[in-house]
Amino acid sequence: MTWTIAFSLLVALPLAVAIPPPDFGFPEAPNHTELSVTYQANGNSFVVAEADLFGVDIPAKEPTVAVETASYESIATYNGSYVLLMVDPDARYPSSPNLRFILHWLQTDMTVAAQSPDGTSQLVNSSAPRVPHLGPSPPTDSAAHRYIIYAFFQHANFTFPQNFEDFNATSRTNFNLPSFLDESKLGQTPAAAMYYFASNQTQVPQDFTATAGGTYPGGNGGMITAGPGPNITSSTAPAAPSTSASTTSSSVTSTSASDSGTSASGSASQTASETGSTTRSAASASDTSDAVKLLVGSGGLVAGLISLWNLV
Ligand SMILES: *[C@@H]1O[C@H](CO)[C@@H](O)[C@H](O)[C@H]1NC(C)=O
Ligand SMILES: *[C@@H]1O[C@H](CO)[C@@H](O)[C@H](O)[C@H]1NC(C)=O
Ligand SMILES: *[C@@H]1O[C@H](CO)[C@@H](O)[C@H](O)[C@H]1NC(C)=O
Ligand SMILES: *[C@@H]1O[C@H](CO)[C@@H](O)[C@H](O)[C@H]1NC(C)=O
Ligand SMILES: *[C@@H]1O[C@H](CO)[C@@H](O)[C@H](O)[C@H]1NC(C)=O
Ligand SMILES: *[C@@H]1O[C@H](CO)[C@@H](O)[C@H](O)[C@H]1NC(C)=O
Ligand SMILES: *[C@@H]1O[C@H](CO)[C@@H](O)[C@H](O)[C@H]1NC(C)=O
């Protein structure tokens, strides 16, 4: 039965491209294998739809994640555990992502719970997170950042790569995702993925178009819009794996303020459908990188201590 459903779903999606879209240039889950991501707010839950745009009132607490067991054969036939990763490729600005990637969450040994009536199976951690979840907090002068949540098949021989031991709650920047996937032998192909945008812009950008009933999510404190995220140029997107494996040495250290934005007011809503579009262009061109230079410069530690939580 599962196989039948999976087959018909795949057939029903002739444009089943990867997720996140290939033009982003980041690791892609093939066949549009979605990771189900659900946030809780005020007793309501909302499921993230691909390319949703949120304000920063998106809950700071980690979402529940689930694999869509009934929908994908590759998921249904896999019995092992998963490595979960959440990254922001757009720090400090999408136009100059000098801190790429910010590691928002890293959890190994996620086991698969029994399938729910909705056809998904929750991923449950059996150990403490390697790097605890940190909610979105892009700078107020930045275009929306992308947040990508990946589940990778955790093969039986998985060991945590030594070069990445130093990433933790207070050290999250310049996470070299491609190198991590190489060194952990997880491979560059996720089992499933989901992504959304979040913005803390205090001014409504000129290219924002509210959909019916929607409001701008960054400047007005709202938690979610009914509209899709902004267009992103692929030129800002390519993953830039460094040739060096020692990505951890230059990490900016900073205090974590992962839960400082605890208010999750605003009504929960959910965009009903995925955006079919994978072509995104014209991100804000007005970003500056001065603050980044402040951060990564030799005297940046103090600035980092103060401000990391407000730039990712
Ligand atoms: C993607 O789907 C095709 C059939 O639609 C299948 O042959 C292929 O194995 C799938 N790939 C993965 C990685 O699931
Ligand atoms: C998964 O587990 C079931 C029962 O435990 C077994 O029948 C099946 O062969 C396993 N599949 C894989 C891919 O290991
Ligand atoms: C699972 O992760 C949560 C936070 O993400 C943590 O509070 C909990 O202790 C972890 N569970 C185990 C068994 O370590
Ligand atoms: C968003 O920006 C405001 C300043 O306009 C700041 O007070 C708030 O902490 C920011 N929120 C997050 C989650 O970064
Ligand atoms: C795991 O290690 C064993 C023994 O070294 C090897 O035979 C097997 O192919 C490895 N499996 C994977 C998935 O790498
Ligand atoms: C995080 O790792 C850094 C080194 O990268 C270390 O200095 C710091 O003490 C660690 N913090 C925690 C909370 O483990
Ligand atoms: C995003 O790109 C699509 C396709 O190129 C275009 O139709 C749409 O108007 C763009 N949206 C914005 C906000 O620029």
Image (tube, rainbow, N blue to C red):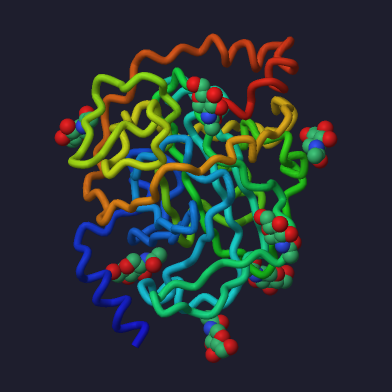
In the picture, the quarter occupied by the C terminus is top right
Q: Which residue occupies 59% across, 41% down?
A: 262
Looking at the image, the residue that sits furthest to the bottom is 1
In the picture, the quarter occupied by the N terminus is bottom left
Task: Assign ligand 5 to one image quadrant.
Answer: bottom right
Query: Is residue 137 at least partly visible in the picture?
Result: yes
Asked whether 24 or 86 is in front, the reply is 86
Is 199 above or below relative to 1? above
Which of the 4 quarters of the picture holds residue 206? top left
Q: Which residue occupies 33% across, 61% down?
A: 31
* Residue 75, percent from left and from top: 46, 72
* Residue 117, percent from left and from top: 41, 80
Left or right: residue 21 compared with residue 178: left
Asked whether 252 or 254 is in front, the reply is 254
Left or right: residue 56 compared with residue 103: left
Is 4 above or below relative to 22? below
Which of the 4 quarters of the picture holds residue 303? top right
Q: Which residue occupies 21% across, 57% down?
A: 15
* Residue 27, percent from left and from top: 46, 47
